Image (spheres, rainbow, N blue to C red):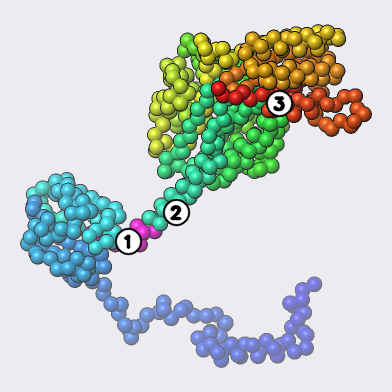
Amino acid sequence: MNFTRWSARLPGTQRRAAARTDTATALSPDRRADGSVPAARAEQPTDESPAAPEVPSVDELPVRDVLDRVPALVALLHGPEHRLAYVNDAYVAAFGRRDLGARAHEALPELDEPGLFPLLDQVQRSGRPRTLKSRKATDGRSYTFTCTPVGAGRPGDGRGVLVFATDVTDHAEAAGRLRASERSQRETAVTLQRSLLPQKLEEPDDLRVAATYHPGGTEAAVGGDWYDVITLGGGRTALVIGDVMGRGVRAAAVMGQLRTAVRAYARLDLPPHEVLQLLDGLAAEIDANQIATCVYAIHDPNEGRLVYASAGHLPILVRDEDGTVQRADEPTGPPLGTGGWIHASGSIALPPGSTAVLYTDGLVERRDEDLDEGISALERALSGAAGTPQVVCDRLIRSAGVTPDHDDDVAVLVLQHPARGGAEAELFRNAALELLGGVEAAPRARAFASGVLTSWRFPTDLHDLGVLATSELVANSLQHGIPPMRLRLRRTDRRLIIEVTDGDDHLPRRRRAEPGDESGRGIAIVATIASNWGSRRTPGGGKAVWCEFVLQKP
């Protein structure tokens, strides 16, 4: 239905329409009868309209008057001797009045400290402007100086130089405060990083270790590189190195949490791949947006190998006694924090006389080189690096070109399995006995231990304690374990280690035996008489139970 057509017939509609038309006509006399509006008055000039004022040409402006009023400092120098021809009021207010006609070295000595005089000669010779940014002058303020050639003639033919100095003190001070804040934040991150790294490395009996950490240069925020050496007991040693992706305090804080977790998990004496599995879940809980690479390795002097697991980290390098370098490439899983991956352990030989190197990517990664090229260069450097672990560390750092301005932080961990001979070799001895089941196994084990400890010339009290600990460990294995069983005695220059292995993977625990119990006292006796004891599952299945006695220094 057309409501517009029908509205004219409604009562009062025509009266209201007529009233609106009369009001509009009264308020707008320019409105035409047909309802249209005439053009705007500005588009209808009349003879009475005033003419627009004329704008003077730039060529007609008085240059002297303009330069005098410019807030920047202006000086005009003329001729090859740079004689002063003009300074504006701002220059006079800043440095005082100057003698016109004098050479710049004499008339404008304040330009010497910012290094402006050589620039004047360059502008004279080249005919091109030159700029010095944010230079401090003798009045204590900072200026950006621009020297521009002026006047006729060829370059070097007597033309003048206009010196234009803009006060940038506020900008310079703001930039200085920003740089100071960045330095303070970096120093805080470096301090945090170093405090979270081990202040002193643990010293294993069978290994010689050294480590170094170099933070990135002032232009690079410190990262999350870390390393650690953990003695596990029973002669075994855990070695770890890692790198948290990211920069600054946050990366260093995540690194500290991971390093603490590694030490806690290492005390469980788990295989390397199980330690990384636990770290993987923890890294995701700490920060789901941050990942880390890590390699965890365990050295067992009885095996002569380095068992390791890697989470996206660079391969371990091992140098034999003859200088041959091997690379432990496999197996390698994804970085920590990614989840959904089952890590695996691998191994590489570490015989006496060999050196192993664990490192972060800052040592081998360069922007203009492939990563494999950097690792190959490190292999060549390691092949010729001899000496103590600290000497090897220093040589590898130098060969990689790591300087205080390096664009990434670097961590290096070097371990050596020394080849011992002569009197020193007498302090590192091993003896083993295969245990056969039966009632004669325990007496045979005690007799074997007694003979070995006597040949190693231990004092009577330590000899007796060692035989007692051997008897209890063997009895525990015979009662609760299954074949194959083995007794192993080991001495170092610091301790006596007794270890019994069997095929059962049930780990013993220390418990309190009641007066009427027939068993449960063996581990308690061992824990009481020994300096330390522990147990672990062996890679091929089964377990190892060990104890150790610290030797008194002669």
Density class for disc 2 (Cα within 10 Å; few <14, some 14-19, many ≥20) is few
Q: Is 92 rendered above or below residue 446?
A: below
Q: Which residue corresponds to mark 1?
A: 169
Q: Which residue corresponds to mark 3?
A: 530
Residue in the picture at 49% in, 42% down = 222
Q: Secondary structure at mark 2?
A: helix
Residue in the picture at 61% in, 23% down = 551
Identify the mark nearer the N-term, 2 or 1: 1
Residue 48: x, y in percent?
33, 86
Observer-side mark, 2 or 1, equals: 2
- Gap in angstroms between the C-alphas marked 2 and 1: 18 Å
Q: Is residue 243 visible?
A: yes
- Gap in angstroms between the C-alphas marked 1 and 3: 72 Å
Question: 509 and 154: which one is in front?
Answer: 509
171 falls in the magenta region: yes
Q: Is 72 rendered above or below residue 183?
A: below
485 falls in the magenta region: no
Residue 108 image-quadrant placement: bottom left
Picture quarter with the C terminus: top right
> From this viewpoint, which residue is outermost toward the right?
516
Q: Which residue corresponds to mark 2?
A: 181
| Magenta residues (range) | 164-174
Q: Secondary structure at mark 3?
A: loop
Does residue 154 appear left or right of residue 337 in this picture?
A: left
Q: Secondary structure at mark 1?
A: helix
Residue in the picture at 41% in, 53% down = 180
Task: Identify the amino acid type marked 2.
Answer: Ser
Residue 402 image-quadrant placement: top left
Identify the mark nearer the N-term, 2 or 3: 2
